Image: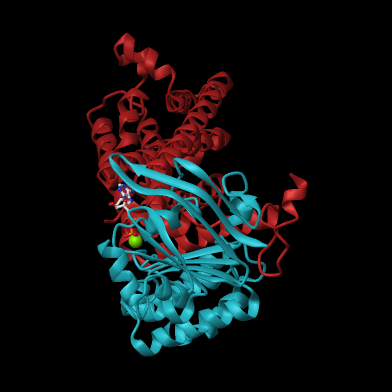
Amino acid sequence: MAILEACLLAKRFGPVTAVEEVSLTVAEGEIAGLLGPNGAGKSTTLHMLLGLVTPDSGSVRLFGLDLDRHRTEVLSQVNFSAGYLGLPGVLQVREVLDAFARLYGLRHPARRVAEVVGLLDIGSLLKRKVIDLSSGQQTRVHLAKALLNEPRLLVLDEPTAALDPDTGDRVRRLLVDLARESGRAMLITSHNMREVERMCDRIHFMSAGRIVASGTAAELAADFEVADLEEVFLKVARQ
Amino acid sequence: MTLDMTTVPETTTVLPPLSAAARRRRISGVVRRDLASLRRSPIRIFEIVFWPTIELVVWGFVTVYLQASKVPFVVSMLLGAVLLWQILHRASNEVAIGFLEDIWSRNLLNMHVTPLTTTEYLSGLIVFSLTKVVFSVAMMGTMAYLLYGFGILTIGVALVPFMGLLLVLGWSLAIVAISCVLRFGEGAQVIAWSLVFVFQPIAGVFYPVSVLPSGLQVVASFVPATHVFQGMRDVLGGAAIPWDRMAAAAALDVVYVALALALYTVTLRHARAKGRLSRFGE
Ligand SMILES: Nc1ncnc2c1ncn2[C@@H]1O[C@H](COP(=O)(O)OP(=O)(O)O)[C@@H](O)[C@H]1O
Ligand SMILES: [Mg+2]
């Protein structure tokens, strides 16, 4: 069953057409990547899928439910993290996670917090204030928050940009494992082509508000007659 | 519709999203977040002690002066007004601050992708604000008694409806202030702090509205607080609790809350349409 079905989404901001006729499906267990140059409309697309931005036209269905009419049920099973977001900085990490565990209506907040703390290896950060953490540490806290409700769809907007190669690698492995083991679906944007190549089952290239190409990394490279995703990106961006 | 629902299987992790238990859990998330935030920012604790103290001291000495110069005046009315005004003021500011903190910490999108509904979010802010209002009032009440011998409890049982009516008005003003920030951006924060003061002269907090020009008196009669402060003076002057006034204030409160909620709903819809939620803190 499709976890996510977006149909002909469009969004204008005044004179700017941010997204035009974007249709997208993500299946159970699939990790989908959304690539494209700055301003292509990736974040706007993600925000429409999360109900943060209302599309001018088109529809979003998650788990077969209309997002608009079943917001609370749908969002209980979705989570989101983005490089440009903050968390209440004066709070200690454990207070932040406790609050979000409750905001997602978890049955056993404390137990689940302990689990995600283990998954992201942030036990040593629990008593520290979020503002005092390095950006890589903050990213791990953001990801812990994003896993709290065991989301069936995890949406990540440039999530790993602040991580060092080692942590980045471990986080990527973790996300891939989660998708493989639990059938969790993910939709990810990133400017790290190697990361996308390694993680994503299916990649959608956006340019000027449209999806201009979709496929696996290998298929895209073949279609564009280039060696790898990086070169696909350059070709798309410079078209 | 029921068929639709079956496609979201129950999980062991999340409580059934529409259940009362889930709603309570989510509200507790807002409250605990705000309480933690208060505990971690001593400056804010300082603030809730500082302003009530200043106001009480200033107005307390005014009453002492008036008494000394033999102005016929019921001292308790002025101090009662100061205390009740604090309830309105704090109720309005503390709810607004919970929302502003999300903006200051760029946490707004995180909040808006949770399953939290508008009602749950606002309920959480309100429950949290209650803890601070209770704290402020208890502190001021004690000080008024120690410094000036004024016991707020002399207002008697009427104190309960008075406080309740002012709290509800304060919350509705806070929701209006939040809507303004959502609509006009962070620059509108000043509205969050000052909106309540528009009502200070009109509602006859420190004087009967009969001293106002007749046009303003009409306006004042549509402000719930007007009836509360007049009711307080009646009661302290020895009259019975004016239940008709209380009923009028309650009815007006309902209208204010309904309008504030409608405004918030429209503003949120507008913010989503214009993509404004992601524009804060940039
Ligand atoms: N809330 C907004 N208000 C006005 N313009 C916006 C808003 N959000 C995005 N845009 C514009 O829409 C276009 C797409 O932006 P975005 O979706 O953020 O692209 P990407 O994430 O691919 O870099 C850009 O031109 C951007 O300036
Ligand atoms: Mg973006």
For the point 30% across and 53% down, which residue is it? B50
Residue drawn at the location 42% of the way across and 63% of the way down: A213
Q: Which chain corresponds to the colour red? A: B
The front one of A110 and A226 is A226
Q: Residue at x 28, y 62 (%)?
A: A38
Q: Nearer the viewer, residue A16 or B69?
A: A16
Q: State the residue in front, B11 or A117.
A: B11
Residue A93 in view of the camera: no
Which image quadrant: the C terminus of chain A? bottom left
In the picture provided, is B17 more to the left or to the right than B224? right
Q: Measured along the vertical axis of the image, is residue A116 above or below residue B54?
A: below
Examine the rendered structure and indicate whether residue B270 appears above or below residue B256. below
The quadrant of the image that shows the N terminus of chain A is bottom right
Q: Position of residue B142 (x, y in %)?
A: 42, 51
> Is residue B254 visible to us here?
yes
Is the residue B38 above or below the residue B80 in the image? Answer: below
Residue A139, how many percent across, how many down?
39, 75
Q: Residue furthest bottom?
A: A166
| Residue A153 percent across, percent down from the top left | 57, 65
Residue A202 located left or right of residue A159: right
Q: Considering depth in this image, is B253 or A194 the residue closer to the camera?
A: A194
Residue A230, x across and y down, in percent:
32, 76
- Give the colouring mode of the picture: by chain
Number of numbered tags placed on the structure image = 0
Instruction: Give left or right: position of A45 versus B121.
Output: left
Chain A representation colour: cyan
Ligand 2 positioned in quadrant: bottom left
Quarter of image, res A116: bottom right
